[in-house]
Amino acid sequence: MFGYRSDGRKIKTLSPEFKLIPSIMRERSDAHVYFKQDVKLNGINEYIQKKQEEGIKFTTMEVFMAAILRILATRPALNRFVMNGRTYARNHICISLTVKQAMTDSADESTIKLYFKGNENIFEVKKKIEEELAIGKDTVSENSTDKVANILGFVPVPIIRFLVSTIKFLDKHSLLPKWLIKASPFHTSCYVTNVGSLGIDSIYHHLYNFGTTSMFFAMGKKKKSYIYEDDEIKEEKVINIGFVGDERICDGFYYATSFKALCRILAHPEVLETNLDEVVKDQK
């Protein structure tokens, strides 16, 4: 069927505006919206400390990833993508992130892609992240993404350009093989990077025109900042989140409401210990 994809289903009940926008902003890079948010670390730090006393070691990244998964599962319009002028609801939830095998200039990077059902609790998210990171940091083991990248690394540049152009053409016309979509880190619900581990503040990372990624989160280093709250300016320990999103998948109100939900979860991460009863499905 025309427009059918293995990774998403076409949304038919869009408003006239959202039907028109993908024809005006044809590339994902045309539709970037930028947002930065200081997230208070009080709730996260207290939760991590409490779990550590119970013998469970959590990282800020693991809490953040579990929180992102929860909003993707409960705010389904965030899990959409636009391809060839059509808007799709993704059939699954997945998050891509890049792992540095060692903190040196010469160390290789490995990209991992985590698939979720959406109802996982924070302990299940932690387990999956640890398993995939162990593979990603292993200099011997390779995931499917690394294998494809390494094969292309031996191909001359003109041939790589031809292959990439062919892949983009197939993707645009819903003909890309399912195995290649699964291997591609660019076909994902969102991309996450922790630049704070490099000792720098958050960045605005562009969205790729290749693939289907509609959101990019960048976590900065932990720092102190002044927060205006309850008519007072308070000094708080925070982590700054840099976000770039595709404005063609939902409106600003939906994005803003979703960010508020994310911040509420991060203020009380214990809510993530309970499995989600039901993953909210997007409209047909």
Image (spheres, rainbow, N blue to C red):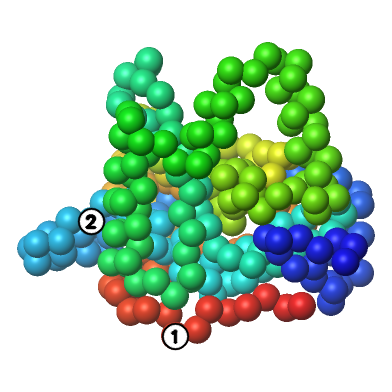
What x and y, as percent, mark residue 60? 30, 52
Residue at position x 64%, y 45% from top? Answer: 180
Residue at position x 86%, y 46% from top? Answer: 26
What x and y, as percent, mark residue 143? 45, 41
Q: Which residue is mark 2?
A: 58
Which of the marked residues, 1 or 2, is nearer the chain's N terminus? Answer: 2
Based on the displayed image, in which of its 4 quarters is residue 14 positioned?
A: bottom right
Report whether 165 appears left or right of 6.
Answer: right
Residue at position x 50%, y 42% from top? Answer: 144
Please tell me how crowded label 2 is: few (under 14), some (14-19), or many (20+) other residues with Cα within 10 Å. Answer: some
| Image quarter (top left, top right, bottom left or bottom right) of the C terminus | bottom right
What x and y, as percent, mark residue 118? 48, 71
Is residue 35 visible in the rendered image? The answer is: no
Please tell me how crowded label 1 is: few (under 14), some (14-19), or many (20+) other residues with Cα within 10 Å. Answer: few
Relative to residue 202, is residue 150 depicted above or below? above
Q: Which residue is mark 1?
A: 277
How many marks on residues? 2
Based on the displayed image, in which of its 4 quarters is residue 2 positioned?
A: bottom right
Front residue of this view, candidates 90 and 20: 90
- Mark in the foreground, 1 or 2: 1
- Amino acid type, residue under disc 2 in the picture: Phe
Residue at position x 33%, y 79% from top? Answer: 274
